[in-house]
Image: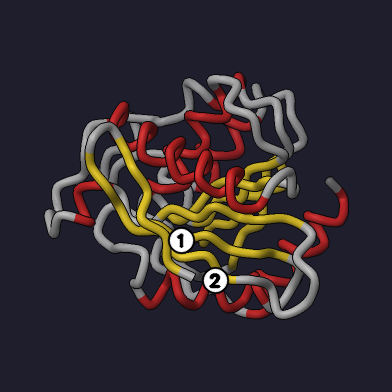
Amino acid sequence: MSWRVAVDGEETTAAYERATVTGKAVFVCAHGAGSDMNHRSMLALSEVLRNGAFDVVRFNFLYREKGSRRPDPMPRLKACFEAVVARTRAELGDKKLVIGGRSMGGRVASMLAAEGFACDGLLLLAYPLHPAGKPEKLRDAHLPQIRVPVLCVNGTRDALCRKDLMEHALATVQTRWEMRWLDGKDHSFPVTAAVGEVAERWLQSL
C-alpha cells in the first residue's frame, strides 16, 4: 500500500507492507544517505522483517523524493521522519512502534529518540558512528539521552563504525542497548534471515 505524506508543504512517498504473520509492531524504516526507499538493501530488510513479526513502512526523505542525492539538513530529515510516523499512527492506530533504518536513516531516528520522540524501540543497521576515515568526528553525543531499548547491528569491518569506539561510546548509555556485530562485514552488509531472527527475539523482549 502506497501513501502520499505531507511534509511542511511538500509531499513524499511511503510504502506500508504487512507482516506475513500477525504483525506485533510496525517498523518505520529510513534509508541511508545514498539510497532510497526502493533500494535493494531496503527491500531485503523489509522482506526479512516482514517474515517475522514486523509490519514495515518504508519512505523517502524529501531530497530523494525530488531526485537529489544531497541529503537535507538534519532538521528537515527529522521533520520528514516525524511526518511519516504521524501518518503511520493515523493509519494503524496504537500498534507498537519501532523506528530506525540503515546508516543515516538510523541516525536520524536515534536523534529523534534522544529528544524524547515517542516510540517503543530503536532498530539501527550500520549505524554511522563517524565519517569514513575520520574516527575523531564521533556522532555519539546524543546517545546517552536515548531512553528506549535499542537493537543495533553493525559489521566488524564497517569504515563508519570502529568497534572499539562504539563500545567506548556505549559505556555512557543507560538504556538497554543490544549490540550485534557481524564478523567480517562492512557498512553495506546484506540483511539475512539471521538478522530477522535477532530482531524478532529483541521485539519479543520489549
- Picture coordinates of residue 73, whole percent (x, y): 23, 32
Q: Does any portion of residue 161 appear in the rendered image?
A: no
Please tell me which residue is depicted at 54% across the width and 57% down the height of the picture: 154
Vertical side of 86 occupied by 161: above or below: below
Where in the figure is residue 161, as x and y percent of width and height? 44, 47
From the viewer's perspective, is 206 left or right of 118? Answer: right
Q: How many marks?
A: 2
Q: Are marks 2 and 1 in contact (CB under 8 Å)?
A: yes
Using the image, tell me which numbered label, if any, was put on residue 97: none
Residue at (33, 42) in percent of width and height: 6
Q: Which mark is residue 58?
A: 1
Label 2 crowd bin: few (<14), some (14–19), many (20+), radius 10 Å: many
User: Residue 120: where, in percent of width, then height?
Assistant: 72, 39
Residue drawn at x 80%, y 71% is 22
In the picture as drawn, the residue positioned furthest to the right comes out as 205
- Secondary element at image label 2: helix
Between the residue at mark 2 and the residue at mark 1, the CA separation in whole angstroms equals: 8 Å
> Does 194 sit above or below residue 187?
below
| Amino acid type, label 1 | Arg
What residue is rendered at 30% in x and 63% in y? Answer: 36
Q: Is residue 109 left or right of residue 93?
A: left
* Circle nearer the viewer, 2 or 1: 1
Q: Secondary structure at mark 1?
A: strand
Horizontal and vertical percent position of residue 79? 37, 32
Q: Does residue 159 appear left or right of residue 16 in this picture?
A: left
Is the residue marked by circle 1 packed among few (<14), some (14-19), or many (20+) residues within 10 Å? Answer: many
Amino acid marked by disc 2: Ser
Per the image, the residue denoted by label 2 is 46
